Amino acid sequence: MKNYCNQTLRVRQAFSPKPTLAYTMNRRDFLAATGSAVIAFSLWPLGPTWGADSDIAPAGNIGELNATGAGGIDLYIERRNLLIGGRPGRAIAINGSIPGPVIRMTEGKEALIRVHNLMPESTSIHWHGILLPFTMDGVPGISFPGIPPGEIFTYRFPVRQNGTYWYHSHTGLQEQLGHYGQLVVAPAAPDPVAYDVAHSIVLSDWTFEDPHRVLWKLKTMEGYYNFQRPTMANIQDQMQATGMTLKEVIDKRLAWDRMRMDPTDIADITGATYSYLINGKTAAGNPVFTARPGQRLRLRFANASTMTFYDIRIPGLPMTVVQADGQNIQPVETDELRIAVAETYDVVVTIPDTLSSDWAYTLFAETMDRSGYARATIAPRPGIDAAVPGLRRRPMLTMADMGMMMDEDMDKDMKHHGHMDKNKKKDDMVMQHPMPDHGGERRELPTQNLPDRIRHGSAEHGPASITMARMAYRRLNYPGAGLGNDGWRVLTYSQLRALERPYGRRAPTREFDLHLTGNMHKYIWGFDGKKWSESKMIRFQYGERLRINMINDTMMSHPIHLHGMWMDLYAGGNLDDNPRKHTVIVQPAELLTVDIFADAPGQWAFHCHLLYHMEAGMFRTVAVVHDLKGGPTHAKV
């Protein structure tokens, strides 16, 4: 650290610790702040590096810091070479490595974090899932102007929650280059989760390509990285895997061709360019998490990937899920779970006490599209390996994923997944399209037995949306494409139940629909057919309970994240036990409902957490205001 402390830096306290008025920035300034990484991508750092190029350090040398301890902490952000999977790559390191250090905090105390930008470009840090003043949220152009080159920005905020979270850059595509790390917030009260030892697990994806070139390729050629599409060469393989005849396989492929859709369009970016990491190490690096027989091991998972969903299992060990997005839930035992980009899960596994001295288990994180995997080992000491499972066959989307099911097929699917109430009439199960309510009498909306599906309206979303499923329906019991056919128990949102009733729970009085839209041919993503640059600010009224019905018109799953406020997910439960999340997966053709307590004045980001989707337009600004009819762009308290 001494070499950093001794160098001369321009130091500026950019904001007071106390909340101030919203930072306003026009589009030109916004693009300049968030796009500076494009210009500086190939430049070397201005400051010293953590190791000479002739002796490149490996990624994954993760430390720990306590942000609520005396004097706070310092984070140093720089571009430097690191060995990733044994190959040198140009990364954005935090305190010398990717991921950055695990940052610990304690609920009820104040966090103090000084971020030193040693790069020749602007940067930022967003504290994902943390409730704080919006001026500390770390989103350039929304809550502050970013951290200029060579400067220091001080984050200071009260810690009002506990659990497992993470942090990352919100500037350009810096997150893809390693600018992320895990947050662990200790509870002020006794922890309801009993465990003997805990380990932090940061999942991520890495490319040795320039991220801006990756985005250019996605915009230039649809499915650029998808090498698993149906071809004549694999037609026999598909027949054997599905049990279909040659004619049935050809007819199915022709049906997808007529829709100009690809049933293997599971992930935009695949193992064709990605290396998959756990704590900065590839599968060959095999990080080891130690435990002893008989111990209860708590694993804190954070998916810090830019584009990759992981399916996690530990063959031979059931997992008990105890937290989702930092919130305690009623324990659920499962064999496998899918973690979306930006989600966190805490699980507890019990190591059998009858094992030999050389026991080991493989922690296997398989990508959703089956193009690769990350892995680690749970063992009593390093140097012990367990068998690594083979990759499963890549999944294919179905007509259900396109919302193309006929009514009778839809009814069968609802019954199969436990969504249909036999006492309900079919018409009662179809939601009408609510419109935003900007005034008048407010009545409480129902909180249980919500309609199971919604017909797509006549509204067109233009060239920014080319799918528009005929019907969107609730898929809370659906584990996701490629899961649920192995005989293993798979976690679904329908199983998540809050351990205790969260604060602020009451029925909402206003609701609106929000369509998730996209055009893979042009690689345009947005909400209601509009990119961020074409959209208007979404207004929440301070203190209200608001409902958003998210309707996925695309073929892809989208992890949607709201900054500054919780989303109470309708999971078939009630006000007491529906789970509270900061990021929700909206699956293809899914209708997913969240209720929000608008208790955070200011301007906030609301976006898909697939980084390249956000960069391509799937982003909105939310303003929490006192008056929906006009007035300032944020509420002051």
Image (spheres, rainbow, N blue to C red):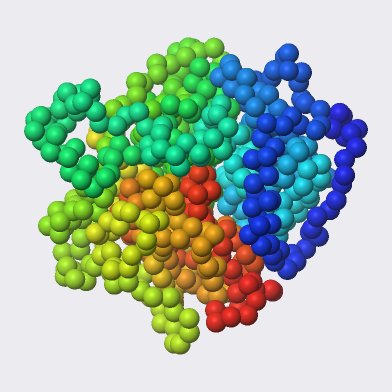
Q: Is residue 244 visible in the rendered structure shown here?
A: yes
Q: Is residue 594 left or right of residue 61?
A: left
Position of the N terminus by quadrant: top right
Residue occupying image coordinates x 33% and y 48%:
555
Report the front residue among 494 and 479: 479
Position of the C terminus by quadrant: bottom right
Residue 423 position, x and y percent, is 16, 68
Report the front residue among 564 and 415: 564
| Residue 182 picture quarter | top right
| Residue 393 picture quarter | top left
Report the front residue among 13 and 110: 13
Residue 404 position, x and y percent, is 21, 53
Residue 310 position, x and y percent, is 43, 35
Residue occupying image coordinates x 72% and y 55%:
145
In the depicted structure, whether residue 559 falls above or below residue 383: below
Residue occupying image coordinates x 55% and y 82%:
629
Q: Is residue 339 left or right of residue 381?
A: left
Number of labelled discs? Answer: 0
In the depicted structure, whether residue 367 falls above or below residue 121: above
Q: In this view, does 177 lie to the left or right of 396?
A: right
Residue furthest out toward the bottom = 440
Q: Is residue 318 visible in the rendered structure shown here?
A: no
In the depicted structure, whether residue 382 falls above or below residue 542: above
